[in-house]
């Protein structure tokens, strides 16, 4: 296939063409070291603190969309065909401060200022989507921004007041949207991109079929979607990732189809892209979803990537297994489908052959007789890794439980169903004693490990209490559980 080696994108108001881009080069390093745009800061280098937040605009089926992302773990090669906006590009009328910046000044939202550019960029992205946000919407947008100096109260006040200083309609990104979209469209040539030196090579397939072909030819390659995990392999562990196949740009992995009794989504759908459907079709996941990482990570991270990682503490597998989800795997032109729980074999081992990848996920929608819940237990509420992740779906008929699916993360070497607890529920009446017995049966399902997030005893107690909590919530009773 004909290919090019040049990475092409827009940076603020200029076109950038780079003839050779190493797979491991991050956007943050490019901005600070190559272009001297030092308003984008390096704090944690792992996508947690938000000091490096920039906006990335990309063409979608719904037009040009801008999202806040972490530059520290976003690889430069993945930005082909995108528009990168840094804090230096913000300005108000006549070169004055941007409305977000003015609000931060007027409401005393900054102290030392190190984290402020990242906070401004997150609030900018929020303001463009929601000009008059609620405090809760502001808090959600700032989950991925850490400030060590100040309480968040003045920052929240600033975010709520941004539209007092200007409107999104007058903003550069709104006024220039059509022109920028036309420029990005012109950059799309339908070619595969192969760039970087031989020992740090990046490949961007032309389309989904090309990806299948490339991965079959290079089964040893690192496949990178949102880079929210692989980014840390480079920044924290200095691991080589070459050859790296970048797939976040592939429209063929971005499909979302709601038909009949299921949602079928491409593996490249991000957390943020799926979120609008949850309130309509899977409302029990809405609060859970907002607690997965921070906003920047949800904008970049993908459902398929979270599954393919195979982590025992991944957030999506337990709740999707509880719903009976299936994954379709693809190798070249060959596909196979299996239950999601069967995909996880052992710690770090999945049912996936070399060159095979997760192509799509099918999530059955629960019927009217099925009660569902999802719980995430962490040390802090927002932007934290789960100690225990818990998904449950229980089907009732005439006051008796006819089917139960319970899946947990953080309790074993893989995301795993609680088979004995399920058996203790099935066929039994809906009662507290039934759930107490099922909770006791969990001791036969799991032998949790102890690590810095939680002890084995704590994990087991939490898992049992979450099962009882589910009963109490569904039964409309106050939740008062033992410590």
Image (cartoon, grey):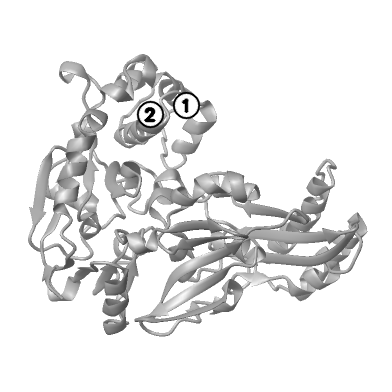
* Residue 432 percent across, percent down from the top left: 90, 55
* Residue 398 percent across, percent down from the top left: 90, 58
**Quadrant location of the N terminus?**
bottom left
* Residue 190 percent across, percent down from the top left: 19, 63
Q: Is residue 240 visible?
A: no
Q: Earlier in the sequence, mark 1 or mark 2?
A: 2
* Residue 8 percent across, percent down from the top left: 14, 54
Q: Which residue is mark 1?
A: 133
Q: Nearer the viewer, residue 219 or 427?
A: 427
What secondary structure is found at the residue carrying circle 2? Answer: helix
Q: Name above or below for residue 136 compared with residue 303.
A: above
Which image quadrant for residue 208?
A: bottom left
Q: Name above or below for residue 328 compared with residue 365.
A: below
Q: Is residue 226 left or right of residue 360?
A: left
Say few, some or many: other residues with alpha carbon within 10 Å of mark 1 (under 14 / 14 to 19 / 20 or more).
many
Outermost residue, front direction? 260
Query: Disc number at residue 127?
Result: 2
Q: Name above or below for residue 231 compared with residue 283.
A: below
Which image quadrant for residue 332?
A: bottom left
Q: CA distance from mark 1 to mark 2?
A: 7 Å
Q: Is residue 369 left or right of residue 313?
A: right
Which image quadrant for residue 125?
A: top left
Q: Nearer the viewer, residue 481 or 249?
A: 249
């Amino acid at each position: 296939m004909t290919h090019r080696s040049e990475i092409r994108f827009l940076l603020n108001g200029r076109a950038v063409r780079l003839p050779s881009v190493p797979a491991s080069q991050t956007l943050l390093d490019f901005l600070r070291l190559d272009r001297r745009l030092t308003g984008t800061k390096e704090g944690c280098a792992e996508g947690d603190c938000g000091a490096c937040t920039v906006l990335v605009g990309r063409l979608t089926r719904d037009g040009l969309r801008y999202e806040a992302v972490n530059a520290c773990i976003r690889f430069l090669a993945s930005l082909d065909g995108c528009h990168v906006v840094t804090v230096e590009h913000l300005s108000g009328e006549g070169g004055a401060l941007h409305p977000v910046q003015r609000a931060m000044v007027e409401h005393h939202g900054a102290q030392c200022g190190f984290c402020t550019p990242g906070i401004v960029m997150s609030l900018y992205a929020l303001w463009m989507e929601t000009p008059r946000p609620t405090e809760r919407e502001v808090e959600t947008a700032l989950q991925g921004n850490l400030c060590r100096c100040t309480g968040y109260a003045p920052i929240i006040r600033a975010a709520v007041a941004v539209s007092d200083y200007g409107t999104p309609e007058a903003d550069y990104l709104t006024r220039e949207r059509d022109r920028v979209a036309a420029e990005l469209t012109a950059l799309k040539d339908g070619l595969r991109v192969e760039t970087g030196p031989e020992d740090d090579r990046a490949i961007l397939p032309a389309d989904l079929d090309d990806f299948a072909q490339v991965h079959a030819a290079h089964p040893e390659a690192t496949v990178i979607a949102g880079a929210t995990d692989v980014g840390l392999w480079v920044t924290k562990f200095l691991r080589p990732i070459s050859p790296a196949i970048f797939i976040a740009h592939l429209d063929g992995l971005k499909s979302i189809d709601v038909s009949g009794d299921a949602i079928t989504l491409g593996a490249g759908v991000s957390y943020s892209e799926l979120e609008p459907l949850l309130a309509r079709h899977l409302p029990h996941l809405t609060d859970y979803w907002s607690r997965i990482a921070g906003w920047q990570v949800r904008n970049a991270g993908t459902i398929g990537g979270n599954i393919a990682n195979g982590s025992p503490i991944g957030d999506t597998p337990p709740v999707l297994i509880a719903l009976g989800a299936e994954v379709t795997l693809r190798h070249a032109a060959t596909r196979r489908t299996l239950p999601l729980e069967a995909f996880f074999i052992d710690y770090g081992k999945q049912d996936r052959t070399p060159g095979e990848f997760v192509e799509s996920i099918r999530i059955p929608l629960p019927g009217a007789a099925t009660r569902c819940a999802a719980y995430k237990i962490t040390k802090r509420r927002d932007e934290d890794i789960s100690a225990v992740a818990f998904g449950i779906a229980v089907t009732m008929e005439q006051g008796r439980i006819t089917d139960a699916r319970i899946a947990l993360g953080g309790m074993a070497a893989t995301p795993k169903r609680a088979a004995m607890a399920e058996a203790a529920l099935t066929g039994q009446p809906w009662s507290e004693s039934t759930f107490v017995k099922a909770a006791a049966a969990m001791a036969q399902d799991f032998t949790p490990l102890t690590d810095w997030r939680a002890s084995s005893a704590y994990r087991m107690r939490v898992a049992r209490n979450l099962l009882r909590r589910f009963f109490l919530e569904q039964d409309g009773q106050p939740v008062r559980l033992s410590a």
